[in-house]
Amino acid sequence: MKAMVLDAPGRPLVERRRRRRRLQAGEVRVQVAACGVCRTDLHLVDGELPDPCLPVVPGHEIVGTVIEAAADVPLEPGLRVGIPWLGWSCGDCDYCRAGQENLCPEARFTGYQLDGGYAEEAIADARFVFPLPAAYDDLHAAPLLCAGLIGYRTLAKAGAARRLGIYGFGAAAHIVAQVARWQGREICAFTRPGDTAAMDFARTQGACWAGGSDEPAPEPLDAALLFAPVGELVPAALAAVRPGGTVVCGGIHMSDIPAFPYELLWGERVLCSVANLTRADAVDFLALADTIPIQTEVVPYPLARANEALDDLRAGRLQGAAVLVPSHG
Ligand SMILES: [Zn+2]
Ligand SMILES: [Zn+2]
């Protein structure tokens, strides 16, 4: 089966033919129909994430069909499933026992320590795959699996905040904005200064205000969600939230946060990050995505053009989410 493989950080992915391995107990083999391209993949390829298991097949927004299941797995071949970032957790440590498997020190992640979905087929632990709502076709379901899921966890950290600022209006933001609007919240979208296309896109996704991240918020925010990996945005967002407000950093990697005066944090403002996801997040979010439903904006690329998709994401040329589609030819 064909796969796009990362041999070393800083190098382009290479197309390889890989031998199928036998399934181990608990595993399923999935024929990949679509795999979303996430900013985390960019951080992986650029060498910004520690200790990847190289060589690795990136990709953790996998939509596919079960084609083989180990004898002990109750999933039937033919079932459509999604495979997200969290590929395995120990189930036994204090975090796992407390419902925080996202923080499990033994956790293994898809497309990072486990081969992911930039391929014709993927293998996953069946306990970490999820049936997907039928209302979404393969292409449009893919961004739900990370942009949606981790975006949802980020939004949840904002509690009951009514007026939300969203910094960085890409794949995660366009899904979160729709969920937040459905929940009756107001969205202010902050994009790269001068990026009028992104501002227009944010407005079409329900933002009541869109401007550059160098502009002040039109009114004090109850919470701010940061999806752009830019440390300078942390003090900017703290300045934009009201006393008691929350700033949530939703990405896995960010450039250094510059020093800022304590008065930006003073007033019981809260600054926190979101790490990974739990299976409970996936169950909750996919049920919500079925109810709303969310219109995901996707830009399809043939699997072999994964490097181009990553370049377009890096350059900010995408509106919505890039999704790789294998040809199975
Ligand atoms: Zn654990
Ligand atoms: Zn991701």
Image (cartoon, rainbow, N blue to C red):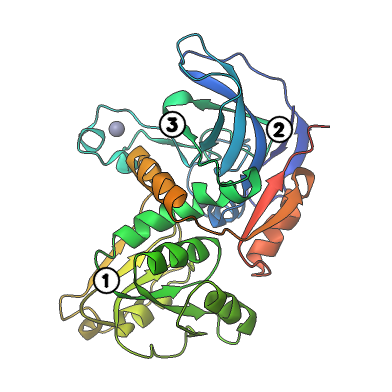
Q: Secondary structure at mark 1?
A: loop
In the picture, the disc for residue 161 is 1
| Label 2: few (<14), some (14–19) or many (≥20) C-alpha neighbours in 10 Å | many
In space, the residues marked 1 and 2 are separated at their CA atoms by 42 Å
Residue 189: where, in percent of width, then height? 46, 78
Q: Depth check: 185 or 267 in front?
A: 185
| Label 3: few (<14), some (14–19) or many (≥20) C-alpha neighbours in 10 Å | some
The quadrant holding residue 204 is bottom right
Q: Depth check: 176 or 292 in front?
A: 292
Q: Secondary structure at mark 2?
A: loop
Q: Amino acid at mark 2?
A: Glu
Query: Foreground mark, 3 or 1?
Result: 1
Q: Secondary structure at mark 3?
A: helix
In the picture, the disc for residue 52 is none
**Which residue extends farthest right?**
329
Choose the circle earlier in sequence order: 1 or 2. Answer: 2
Q: Residue shown at 29%/28% (left/top)?
A: 91
Q: Residue shown at 62%/49% (left/top)?
A: 9
Residue 329: where, in percent of width, then height? 84, 32
Query: Foreground mark, 1 or 2?
Result: 1
According to the picture, the residue beneath numbered tag 3 turns out to be: 128
In space, the residues marked 3 and 1 are separated at their CA atoms by 31 Å
Choose the circle earlier in sequence order: 3 or 1. Answer: 3
Q: Amino acid at mark 3?
A: Phe
For this view, does 287 lie left or right of residue 96?
Answer: right
**Which residue extends farthest top?**
71
According to the picture, the residue beneath numbered tag 2 turns out to be: 120
| Label 1: few (<14), some (14–19) or many (≥20) C-alpha neighbours in 10 Å | some
